[in-house]
Image (cartoon, helix red, strand yellow):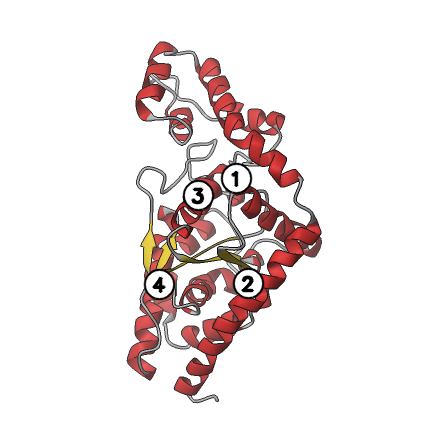
Amino acid sequence: MARLLTGLQPSGALHIGNYFGALKPFIDLSREHESFLMVADYHALTTLKSPDELRHHTLDVVRDYLAAGVDPARAVIFKQSDILEHLELAWIFECLVTVPFLMQAHAYKDKTAKGLEANAGLFNYPMLMAADILLYDTDIVPVGEDQRQHVEYAREAASKFNNTFGTLFKEPKEHILKGIATVPGTDGKKMSKSYGNTIPFFGTRDEIAKAAMSIVTDSTGERPENVYAIHALFREKNELDSLYEANQGKYQALKEALIEDIEAVVAPLREKRDAISDDDVMRVLEKGKRDAGKIASAKMAEVREAVGVR
């Protein structure tokens, strides 16, 4: 059975982009694959500097996974920092790739262009992500379009290692759903916690309404394209087109319809989420630590032997 892996950073509330770009594809694919879902807490340190927030968000993101439909009996849910082999393997990959190669990373260039701190962790991010993926002999990585290059970097890291030390790593493939590969935010750019343009997936009705009402609209077109692009995640195209044609120019009515459609999906999941305790989350993470740790430990034993440090 092919192996599937994806991860989300615990750097803030789960938003619609996270859900449709990575989490929903994972849930759909996990029914037919051996599945691993990672809380990428070490990745979050590139931007999040509050230990209390990180601990809080880590519990919350697992609660989000469970409420959204991830079955811990079918998928290994684990915390990146519980498996130290991720950092060890990332260092080995960093010793194989060049600085100019890492400088080509779209995410790094995009974030620094927007004025975010260019720390070394942000620069080396692709090699830690490569380690996340390759440590588990992953076949498929469901990601947003903006993360495609990171999977390409993982393939390059695998190739560099295999050519230098002998073949130990699979070269994974990305899985991107057409039409929702990059979910737009309230400002029309990619939805991202870093940009403050998100719609919280498990937010209260008022929080969802406030975010939806702030979506930037273009008064020169026949329909508000940013609203439509987000709405397309929740309704079939034919039905949605009819709604927008019937309400041409009525931007508030269309945003209100979007709010109702989001709420119809989120409300029952929100209720399920509220019933998941911290103890429930910790039990899931302890099991994930054991299951993921066995695989990571065995893989790193092979890697250490291959590079000569064992």
Q: Which residue is identified by label 2?
A: 80
Q: Which residue is identified by label 3?
A: 24
Q: Earlier in the sequence, mark 1 or mark 3?
A: 1
- 259 relative to 135, above or below: above
Residue sitting nearer the eye, 138 or 190: 138
- Kindly identify the amino acid type of the residue bearing the numbered disc 1: His
Q: Earlier in the sequence, mark 3 or mark 2?
A: 3
Q: Earlier in the sequence, mark 1 or mark 2?
A: 1
Spatial CA span between label 1 and label 3: 12 Å
Spatial CA span between label 3 and label 2: 20 Å
Spatial CA span between label 4 and label 2: 19 Å
Q: Nearer the viewer, mark 3 or mark 2?
A: 3
Q: Nearer the viewer, mark 4 or mark 1?
A: 1
Q: Which residue is identified by label 1?
A: 15
Looking at the picture, how far across and down is residue 139, in whole percent?
34, 62
Q: Earlier in the sequence, mark 4 or mark 2?
A: 2
Spatial CA span between label 4 and label 3: 24 Å
Q: Nearer the viewer, mark 4 or mark 2?
A: 2
Q: Of helix, strand and loop, which one carries label 3?
A: helix
